[in-house]
Amino acid sequence: YKYAIEKDISAPSLINNEDNVLFSKSDNFALILLLALIFGAALDLTPCSLPLLSIYSATILGSHSTKKDAFINNAAYIVSLALGYSFIGIIFSFIGVSAHVFLQHPVTCIVLSLILLVLALHTLDLLRLPNLPTFNSKIQNGLAMLKNGSVKKAVVMGLLSALFTTPCTSAPLTGALIYVMTTNSIVFGSLIFFAIGLGMGLPLIIIGLFGSKALNVFKSRTSIIKKLLSLPLIITALFVSRHLLGEYSKIASICVYSISLFTLVTLLLNKKNKFLKISLSSIALVCCFVTGYYFENSVGTHKLNFEQIYSIEDLEKYKGEKIYLTVSASWCANCHQLDDELYSTNEFKTLLKDYRLLRYDFTDPNSDSSVKFSTH
């Protein structure tokens, strides 16, 4: 698409403008990495993981470590943990890139969304899923054989900790893996999990600097933190299947964000007056729904109207005209994203005002017309 704009439309302003939609993803990218960092730290503060942090810290630092040794060992652990998660992110991102067409199939999208919702229910303690205790015990036994307080153990612990899961972290991490599989970017997926690894190392830095008592503030809130991890799972379920909802995608987004805000307020007011909790949660739900409805219907832009062509031969009747040809499919999330974030912009509409806008529907790639179209 960048080539088409640059060569056929001669629009360097659209390519180079940092405020343009083609580069707006950089801001979202930084935000997602920040959220991944926070996500990683939250995993450490769940009921199953928080009690282990002091043990992990003592194992990494040893009983007679200086501040210099403590810093080196902590840094070795955190970097190796982040690299371990990056490797996992690369593997699942590669799987996603290799099976992109399969992952974009409507049935696959629906199944992945249902899995994410099941994982969210597990995180909310509304459903119980089995863990892998045998695999985890083998990892723990291997770590126990290494010498405490050594850089070697810190590095090995960091690498193996990326494979270590608890009943509290397995569901959110599985959800994160599903998300990176759908990003269609190996670099993006690996960086997301690198940020998660760094986030999981942050509480250990706090322990190394201030002692385990510094985390006491979270002890009474571990259950809430665990349940809050259900929110990104629910929102990711929407992200995976939103393009299948067509004209109903806006209302689905409003409902999901409203429910997420309602859940957030309810969890944060966990020990407050019951009447106050219900009142504030209901107000948050209504406000989010009304705001979302107004934003989606007032601020949103209209999409371009493409003329549908049904075969490669249909292009013959446009000879001598300037045309802009796009290919889309009902299962193609990236195509719908281009419709929403590129083709609907006023700048793009202005640049295309003298062009005939054509579109071929590639939903059935095995049809005779699609096979012929793709070979020309």
Image (cartoon, helix red, strand yellow):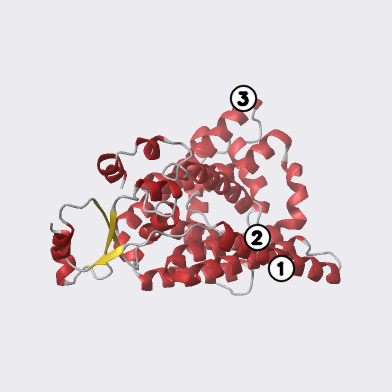
Residue that numbered label 2 is attached to: 228
- Estimate the x, y position of residue 41 in percent, counting from the top left: 61, 48
Q: Earlier in the sequence, mark 3 or mark 2?
A: 3
Res 227 visible: yes
- Disc marking residue 53: none
What SS does tag 2 mark? helix
Q: How many angstroms separate mark 3 from mark 2 (CA)?
A: 36 Å
* Foreground pick, 253 / 348: 348
In this picture, is 132 found above or below 18? Answer: below
> In this figure, which residue is indicated by the disc labeled 3?
68
Left or right: residue 215 compared with residue 58:
right
Q: Amino acid at mark 1?
A: Val
> In the image, what residue occupies the spot 74% across and 57% down?
221
**Disc 3 residue type (three-letter):** Lys
Q: N-terminal of the two: label 2 or label 1?
A: 2
- On screen, residue 367 versus residue 340, left or right, reads left
Task: For marks 2 and 1, give the CA distance.
Answer: 20 Å
Residue neighbourhood size for the residue with mark 2, other residues' Cα within 10 Å, grouped as few (<14), some (14–19), many (≥20): many
Q: Residue at x 69, y 33 (%)?
A: 209
* The C terminus, quarter of image: bottom left
Looking at the image, is 311 positioned above or below residue 95?
A: below
Q: Secondary structure at mark 3?
A: helix
Tell me where residue 141 appears, x and y as whole percent.
51, 52
- Residue on which disc 1 sits: 286
Find the distance from the CA under tag 1 to the CA under tag 3: 53 Å
Locate residue 233: give its quadrant. Answer: bottom right
Residue 285 appears left or right of 135: right
